[in-house]
Image (cartoon, rainbow, N blue to C red):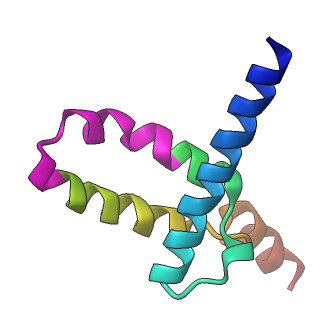
Amino acid sequence: MMRKENGSHLLVYNLLHTVMAQAALGHGVVTRQVRLQGARQTLTAFHSQWAQASPSRREGIIQMVLSAIANHCVGKHARLSFQTARSG
């Protein structure tokens, strides 16, 4: 049972990193800058829209998801911008 759970987690981890790489490559972002947590949250948020969409509309949703994931980059946090502005 534990092997199946570990295998499932590893599969999801690898699939998530594949989506992150596709988003980065398609939007001119360095892959290492895309946030794992931002990608996970974006996929979770768009899941119901994608599941209910017609096949012709799914491609558009996929492009929106990849664009949103590419925008979740390390260093684009409002809190970090605020701290930088205060210290500078």
48 is within the stretch colored magenta: yes
Looking at the image, is 75 positioned above or below residue 36? below
Looking at the image, is 56 positioned above or below residue 32? above
Query: What residue do we see at 73% from left, 61% from top?
Result: 79
Instruction: Find residue 85 and report its image quarter.
Output: bottom right
**Does any portion of residue 75 appear in the rendered image?**
no
Report the number of discs. 0
- Seen as rendered, the residue at the extreme right is 87
Query: What residue do we see at 70% from left, 46% from top?
Result: 13
- Magenta span: predominant SS is helix
Instruction: Find residue 9 and report its image quarter.
Output: top right
Residue 86, position as x, y percentages in the image: 82, 75
Query: What residue do we see at 53% from left, 81% from top?
Result: 25
Query: What residue do we see at 69% from left, 55% from top?
Result: 36
Quarter holding the N terminus is top right
Left or right: where 60 falls relative to 42: left
Left or right: where 73 falls relative to 42: right
Looking at the image, is 9 positioned above or below residue 3? below
**Does any portion of residue 42 appear in the rendered image?**
yes
Instruction: Find residue 32 and report its image quarter.
Output: bottom right
Left or right: where 87 falls relative to 12: right
Report the span colored magenta: 42-57
52 is within the stretch colored magenta: yes
Residue situated in front as seen by the camera: 55 or 41 = 55
Quarter holding the C terminus is bottom right
Residue 23, position as x, y percentages in the image: 50, 70
